[in-house]
Amino acid sequence: MPTASPTGRFTRSVALALIMGAQLMMVLDTSIVTTALPRLVADLGFSPASLSWVQNAYVLAFGGLLLLGARVGDLAGRRRVFVLGVAVFAAASLAAGLAVGAPMMIAARIVQGAAAAFAIPSTLALLVNAYPEPEQRSRAIAIYSAVIGAGASVGIIVGGVFTDLLSWRWGLLINVPIGILVIVLAPRFLTETPRRRGGFDLPGAITITLGMTALVYGLIESSTRGWTDPVVLGSLILSVLLVAAFIGIERRSKEPIVPLALFRDLTRSGAYLGRVLIVGAMFSTFYFLSQYLQNVLHFSALEAGLSYIPLTGMFFATVYVVGPLTRRIGREWLLVASLVVALVGMAWLSTIGAGSAFFPWIVLPLLVLGIGQGIAIILLTQLGMAGVPAEQSGAGSGLVNAAHQLGGSIGLAILAGVFIAVGGDHTAVADQVTGYQTVFHIATGFYLLAIIVAVVMLVISRASRHSEVAAPAAAVSTQN
């Protein structure tokens, strides 16, 4: 096996650092303001009803434009679109950090989400191009996956530190120097992909953007309005109709925004579905556990943020064990095992009470959950990109990230509705604890569904390998 030169290794290492830095910056911004929300009421004049839009504005723009951003990167050049997205994101972060009122903050968050939707799909595609060797690519994807998986928890940690020790504004302003560094170094260390000739599927772009936006909006509003509210039902029905129209358009399009052939591989499609389920469970854990720590155990924002260090540490530690374990027991078997571990951690966390000690009743479940979730995210990223043609790597990366974003939106919407339905939003501590226990029980069910998906993927994979072995043997038998 050829080894990379020191210069080549240095270039790849810097390329990886640039991609990971930008990816982490954008992913953690979905949660970095979580611990600062109470401060925004006093500082920017948010009402309790409008406060949720500090986070929802980002998620809505990000989720709605993600697949469009992936297609633009495939056509215009991924490095070019990546750098432009980072530049706009840094500028919007500056505006958000200097916001003088609620309208300015929400507008800046929308632009942040839109910029991230164009930059993030190019990150995984650029990473695949930078690491053509399978073993090195798997390691790079493992690091990438750990960053995605840990991004939200890192955001809560960083947000808690800045909110308590400095100001919530620094959690946004820190993106500016990071963005400038990426913009300066990317042209030197990231290889540009060639522009592709071809038409732009405008009808497909419009329908999928509006469809994703309607879906994410309906899910966001369901947590406060309820699932039977006309606005929620209208948004969800509209999203279904638009996605159905999008599929019809893509089948006839010569230049589809999302090649439907990417879904023909059942293992890859299973990786998308499994990702939706486990990210839905994990995002909800970040959201509700932070509230439990502050509202029930009376942790400060800083203490609540630091409480996620065990979980985040396990996310990054799993990078070093996935490769050896995959070679020993196989990717599909390891995926099933990791999801079982995550299920155990989430089920353990659901036993928390009003007087639960941080150690062991929270630390140990988070460690177990971090191990299982960390390994599973890495494997699902690898399986989601396995066999994707190079010219479609942007679309493949977009689908992986879309599944990630959609999973967080669906999971949080469902569990927020359940939390309210069981009275978790009441002031009584006993009611709150019941709400937290209930949502963690349902999150455990998400992992159970993911295990079923993984077992189906395992069966399909084994059947596929069996048929590949049997086909040559049958051909030889026929010739004889």
Image (cartoon, rainbow, N blue to C red):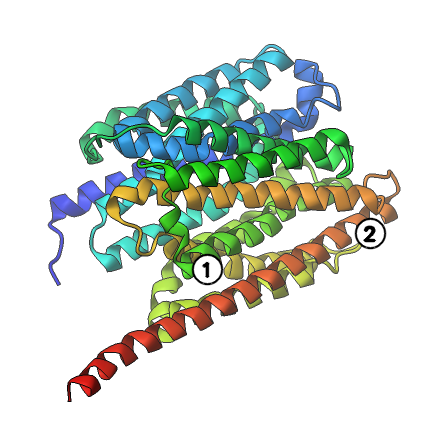
SS type, badge 2: helix
Q: In this rendering, is residue 6 above or below 463?
A: above
Of residues 32 and 220, the one drawn nearer to the viewer in this rendering: 220
Question: Going by the image, does 148 lie left or right of 284?
Answer: left
Q: Amino acid at mark 1?
A: Ile
On the rendered image, what quadrant is the C terminus found in?
A: bottom left
On the rendered image, what quadrant is the N terminus found in?
A: bottom left
Q: Give percent across and percent down for residue 413.
A: 67, 41
Q: In this rendering, is residue 174 above or below 8?
A: above
Residue at horizontal 39%, vertical 74%?
A: 462
Of residues 459 and 467, the one drawn nearer to the viewer in this rendering: 467
Of residues 159 and 350, the one drawn nearer to the viewer in this rendering: 350
- The answer to whether residue 31 is seen in the rendering is no
- The answer to whether residue 462 is seen in the rendering is yes
Callout 1 crowding tier (Cα within 10 Å): few <14, some 14–19, many ≥20: many
| Residue position marked by numbered label 1 in the rendering | 375
Q: Give percent across and percent down for residue 428.
A: 88, 42
Whole-Å distance between the Cαs marked 2 and 1? Answer: 30 Å
